[in-house]
Image: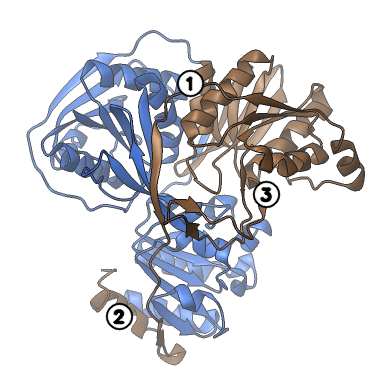
Chain colours: A blue, B brown
Amino acid sequence: MTGIYAENADGQFKKAILEAASYAATIQNGPITAICVGSPNASEAEKLAQYGVEKLIVIEGIHAFDAQQYAQAIAKVAKENGLSTLVFANTYEAKSLAPRVAVHMDAAFASNVIAYPDNSNGFVVKRSVFSGKGYAYVKLENANKIIALTPNSTDLISKPCSISVQTQSADAFQAKTKIESTHKSSGKIPLTEAEIVVSAGRGMKGPENWGMVEDLAQALGAATACSKPVSDMGWRPHSEHVGQTGITIKPNLYIAIGISGAIQHLAGVSSSKVIVAINKDPEAPFFKAADYGIVGDAFEVLPQLLTAVKA
Amino acid sequence: MSVVPDTTTKITFTNNDTALNTQGVQFIINPYDELSLTKALELTEKHGGTVTVATVGLADTDAVIRKALAIGAHDAIRINAEPRDAQFVAEQLSHIVKANAYDLVLTGRESIDYNGGQICGLLGAYLDWPSVNVCTKVEFENGQMAFERDIDGGRQAVSVALPVVASSQKDLCEPRIPNMKGIMAARTKPLQVVEASSSAQVITHQKFENPPAKQAVKLIDAANAGQLIDILRNEAKIIA
């Protein structure tokens, strides 16, 4: 049986979780079970039901995130419900949890999975490797399997069913980690899950010029990102750095402004469906990796784009 | 510590696309592991203790291990095996951690070759220790570890008593570069080679491929840049 870990993001299930549900229901070729920790908002279970989840098991009694405690509780519920394949959305939370759950379930685990499995010779999935410079086809050899699915890799597939919600208490466990404080940037779209990303580099000349990048991102409903030099110089936070030593992303649309396109940067973004490069240097390597390009000054091009988006 | 191709490497595959083509490839310390090493050295300079570098690899990784010793690690352990998958690597490392009295294990957030991002969590589970992923701050304060870690859409401060395993994220510290004295000292520092214990293979690599080549870029006149939005809406149908 196939299930998903439905990460509870402040009471909600994000799109990446619904993608995981679609993926799992497709593998199962039927309705699936979802596990979440902490009660989601009342209408959220219905969202899962749209994508083939017939049972949601809510683990209660854990009040703060602790990877050790979460993983033990999730693995226990998975085992009790006969789930042999568990799909996670590849978020930061999943990266903390999925390896631990794999050990508890004696499962083979593949992260950064970007396509449906090929079952013609065992269970083989495609995952991105070398920070986007390549793909690997890996076979999961154990009876139990865990997959962490990269957001935006597969489509949402509507498979409405009726859903039952069960609650279950977590075993008593003294969590060793203590959360001292949490800061979330409100209203911002997490970069790894964004469908559109507007990214800028040294061509913006200084952090004071980022307003126009942010304006364009906001108008497009996009997340903002940056190149390594820009994050190294402290113009932008490191959490926005995409590339080989930053974050690898896979949005539908990646707009690169004033970024030359070094191999390390391209590695992190080359899986984007459509890439736009804007650079005043016609020889910038990014134009070889882009679908659309504008050779021009960012300070002249960006206002035109903003006007066109708002039109 | 993982030993990985330099970030400038053009990745190609060989043996019928079943293995990385290592010809002409320069191997380096995984950049995130370099941060872990530097942070571990900073912690021992402040609070005492020693830093051991442990890696799973064959003899050809020794040169990179010597570099870690040159940066300042006190000793090194190489588990003599091909690092075939993350679960194998973490299990081997867990035996090393159990056999020695380490109280803090730092890994990278991920390796830049296979990008599994698993070692921190796997080690935590094999050791039954707490694990804290993607840390931008790792300090020993008031008798316990104080971390700051990246979470989805933000940051979180976490405290925990030792022992613990944590993974390093960019911004943790400035990686150190070996100096001449360190390079000389590294030659005589202990590098212990131990054999791997057997374990079942859970992942096998069937085939690799490179991303498909892009078609030629379609250029749009800068004087008429707004046309791009029109194309993205109506031709590529990628924005609303």
Tell me where residue B10 appears, x and y as whole percent. Answer: 56, 63
Residue B196 vertical placement versus B69 (above, below): above
Q: CA distance from mark 1 to mark 2?
A: 50 Å
Quarter of the image for residue A125 reads top left
Q: Position of residue B132 (x, y in %)?
A: 54, 29
Say what amino acid the circle numbered 2 marks: Ile
The residue where tag 3 is placed is B28
Chain ID of residue with mark 2:
B
Q: Secondary structure at mark 3?
A: strand
Q: In the rendered structure, find residue B125 and report the number of the disc placed on it.
A: 1
Disc 1 and disc 2 in contact, CB within 8 angstroms: no
Residue A287, compared with residue A116, is above or below; it is below
Which residue is under mark 2?
Answer: B231
Q: Is residue A5 visible to us here?
A: no
At 26% from the left and 52% from the top, the residue drawn is: A154
- Location of the N terminus of chain A by quadrant is top left
Q: Amino acid at mark 1?
A: Ala
Q: Residues within 10 Å of mark 3 (few under 14, many from 20)?
A: some
